[in-house]
Amino acid sequence: MAEDVELLISYFALSGDVYPLGPVEISPFPFKDRVEAAARAGFKGFGLHYEDTIATQSKIGFAEMKRILKANGMKYLEIEFLLNWYRNDEKRKESDKFRRQLFDVAAELGMRDIKIGPGFHEQTADVPLMAAEFAKLCQEAAVYGADIVLEIMPWSNVRTIETGLAIVSEADQPNGGLLVDIWHLARGGIPFSDIRKIPTRFIKAVEVDDAMKVPPVDDLWEDTIHHRELCGEGELDVPAFLREVRAAGYKGVYGTEILSARHRKLGLDEMAKRVFDSTMAQFAKL
């Protein structure tokens, strides 16, 4: 069952000792070294982070980045992470500027998908508003051949499959859908079987990792950025998650998002190999 699987390594799984919203988010490792380590491990996709991408572009240029990716067989690219894309305030102005910058990168490098987030400080989602703005975002991204993937997150206003599905189905765009991450479903108390509620065309991205059933810290944000585990080294039923994803009809590349204080201190090749081997081992159990 594993022979048809292709994996993408998410940015923070191979960026070194940096983490989301940390003091620095730019990888200390050269872009070329990271891409080559990913290729040696067996990955066919590579995750980008906007600030790191621009820092790399300023040193070697987009043409060289594109050459490196092609030379190493990277078929799938993603970039993260757009927030406040639906708001009507000052934060939206900043978001729109960032949005244009993300599209500039997509125009230069090509992009499988652009990851976007829900509202982090809102209890409820304004579904009609978010659906209308999501549709506009998808239409803009379609020019660059990119999907827009909305991530369900337990601390946000899109913390259930039902809310996420309401937004993307009302928007009804061919390149718009949900990102389903095992960690977010587990921490949000969402049964993996609920993945089957999502029509296949709205599952645009899937991410796998692992975790302990009981969070080691009280704060969900600290848990998600520092305490995820490699697949098979935690207590989540990763094969069960994968079976439900496949039962829902998903046939795309699988992202591997390991956010771990231990993992990020390893060398590049060890990071890449451990993520690849541990993830592929879960598909072998299907």
Image: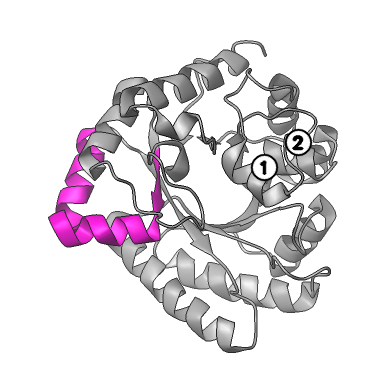
User: Which span of residues is magenta-colored?
Assistant: 46-72
Is 263 situated above or below 111?
above
Residue at image location 46% in from the left, 73% down from the top:
99
Q: Amino acid at mark 2?
A: Pro
- Frontmost residue, 110 versus 35: 35
Q: Is residue 101 left or right of residue 278?
A: left
**Residue 152: which numbered mark, if any?**
none
Q: Quadrant of the N terminus?
A: top right
Principal SS element in the magenta part? Answer: helix
- Frontmost residue, 158 versus 251: 158
Q: Is residue 8 among what the camera can see?
A: yes
User: Of the residues under marks 2 and 1, which one precedes in the sequence?
Assistant: 2
Is 246 situated above or below 201?
above
**Residue 215: which numbered mark, if any?**
2
Q: Is residue 7 among what the camera can see?
A: no
Residue at image location 33% in from the left, 27% down from the top:
267
Disc 2, SS: loop
Picture quadrant where residue 130 is located = bottom right
Is 72 situated above or below 48?
above
Q: Does the CB distance between marks 2 and 1 fall below 8 Å?
A: yes
Q: Tell me, yes or no, whether the highlighted magenta stretch contains residue 69.
A: yes
**Residue 223: which numbered mark, if any?**
1
Disc 1, SS: helix
Picture quadrant where residue 39 is located = top left
Q: Where residue 62 sits: x, y (%)?
A: 20, 57
Is 234 situated above or below 208?
above
Report the Cα–Cα distance between label 2 and label 1: 7 Å
Q: Where residue 152 sits: x, y (%)?
A: 71, 53
